[in-house]
C-alpha cells in the first residue's frame, strides 16, 4: 500500500513538471515578486495517533503561481513513548518519555491549475532537524537528552477555493517520508516492547482559512495611493 501511495505522489510531481508548465514557470519569473509569510499547522500520525505539527514559513511568491521559501516546524502535540530498557543490574526498567522534534525546511509550491475561484497546486517540502525524548512535557532543547538526526520529504497536493477576492478555503494532503537514526535510538533505549518506531511514513493533512490582506486592503481602499500603485484587487 505504501508503495502505491509513493508512486501516486511521484506521478503527481512528474505531471506538474511537464513542458507546458515549464513554459509557464519561465513566464512567472518575469513578474515582480511579493513576500510569502504564513503560519501553518498540519495533522499527521505517529504510531496511529493523530498529532499536530506547527510551522512558520517565509519566502517569495511570483504572480501567486509559485512560492519558494523556508521555515521551521516543530511537534506541537504532547506525544509520549514508553521504553523498557535493561538496567545495569539486569532488571527491566520502565521509562516514559515525551517525544520532541524540530526541523528546518525548504518548500516549493507550484500552481498547475487555476480558474476564477479554484486553484490546484503541488507543494513539496524537505527538511532536516533533530528529534529526542525527554522527561519534561515542555520543550528543553538544551537538556542532556540524546539528539537524533531527522530528515523529511513531503510531496503533496493542495486545493483552494476563493469565496471572495480576499478570502478563501483550502485543504492540503501530503505524504511524509522520513529518515532517522533508528539504530541509535534502539541502542539507547534497548529492550523488548520499546516504542522507538516514530515518524515513519505517514499521510499528513490540513484545512486552511485563507485571507489575503493585500487584496482586502485594495477592496476596502480602492482610491488609496497604495491601491493605485499595486492594485486593484484581482481574483
Image: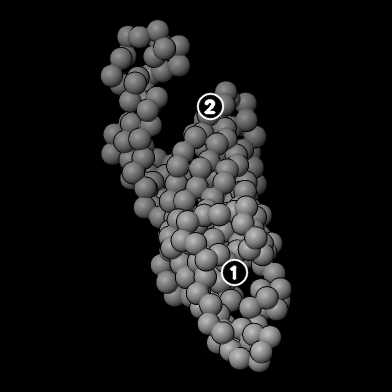
> How many marks on residues?
2
**Rounded to the nearest whole Å, what is the CA distance between mark 2 and mark 1?**
34 Å
Callout in the foreground (2, 1): 2
Q: Residue at x 62, y 52 (%)?
A: 142
The quarter of the rendered structure image containing the C terminus is top left
SS at badge 1: helix
- The circle on residue 7 is 1
* Residue 1 image point, x, y percent: 53, 79
For mark 2, what is the residue?
34
Q: Helix, strand or loop at disc 2?
A: strand
**Could you tell me if residue 213 is visible in this image?**
yes
**Within 10 Å of the Cα at label 1, are there few (<14), some (14-19), or many (20+) other Cα atoms?**
few
| Residue 39, quarter of picture | top left
Q: Residue at x 64, y 87 (%)?
A: 86
Q: Where 76 sits versus 106, above or below? A: below
* Above or below, 25 relative to 92: above
Q: In this image, 175 relative to 208: left or right?
A: right
Residue lying farthest to the front in this orientation: 89
The percent coordinates of residue 3 (x first, y second) are: 59, 75
Q: Which residue appears at 49% of the width and 62% of the height?
A: 136
Q: Which mark is residue 172?
A: none
Q: Is residue 117 visible?
A: no
**Residue 16 coordinates in the image, percent (x, y):** 58, 51
Q: Is residue 184 left or right of residue 223?
A: right
Whether the residues at callouts 2 and 1 have beta carbons within 8 Å, the answer is no
6 or 139: which is nearer to us? Answer: 139
Mark 2 or mark 1, which has the lower sequence index? 1
Amino acid at each position: 500500500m505504501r508503495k502505491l501511495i509513493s508512486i501516486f505522489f511521484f506521478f503527481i510531481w512528474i505531471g506538474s513538471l511537464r513542458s507546458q508548465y515549464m513554459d509557464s514557470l519561465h513566464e512567472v519569473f518575469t513578474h515582480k515578486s511579493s513576500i510569502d509569510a504564513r503560519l501553518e499547522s498540519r495533522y499527521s500520525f505517529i504510531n496511529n495517533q493523530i498529532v499536530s505539527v506547527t510551522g512558520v514559513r517565509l519566502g517569495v511568491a511570483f504572480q501567486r503561481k509559485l512560492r519558494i521559501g523556508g521555515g521551521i516546524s516543530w511537534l506541537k502535540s504532547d506525544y509520549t513513548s514508553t521504553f523498557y530498557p535493561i538496567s545495569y543490574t539486569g532488571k527491566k526498567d520502565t521509562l516514559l518519555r515525551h517525544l520532541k522534534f524540530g526541523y528546518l525546511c525548504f518548500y516549493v509550491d507550484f500552481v498547475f491549475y487555476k480558474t476564477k475561484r479554484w486553484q490546484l497546486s503541488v507543494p513539496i517540502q524537505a527538511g532536516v532537524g533533530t528529534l529526542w525524548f525527554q522527561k519534561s512535557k515542555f520543550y528543553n532543547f538544551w537538556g542532556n537528552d540524546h539528539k537524533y538526526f531527522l530528515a523529511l520529504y513531503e510531496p503533496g497536493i493542495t486545493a483552494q477555493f476563493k469565496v471572495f477576492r480576499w478570502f478563501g478555503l483550502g485543504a492540503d494532503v501530503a505524504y511524509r517520508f522520513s529518515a532517522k537514526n533508528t539504530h541509535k535510538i534502539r541502542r539507547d533505549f534497548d529492550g523488548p516492547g520499546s516504542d522507538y518506531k516514530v515518524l515513519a511514513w505517514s499521510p499528513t493533512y490540513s484545512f486552511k482559512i485563507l485571507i489575503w490582506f493585500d487584496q482586502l486592503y485594495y477592496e476596502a481602499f480602492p482610491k488609496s495611493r497604495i491601491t493605485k500603485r499595486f492594485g486593484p484587487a484581482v481574483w
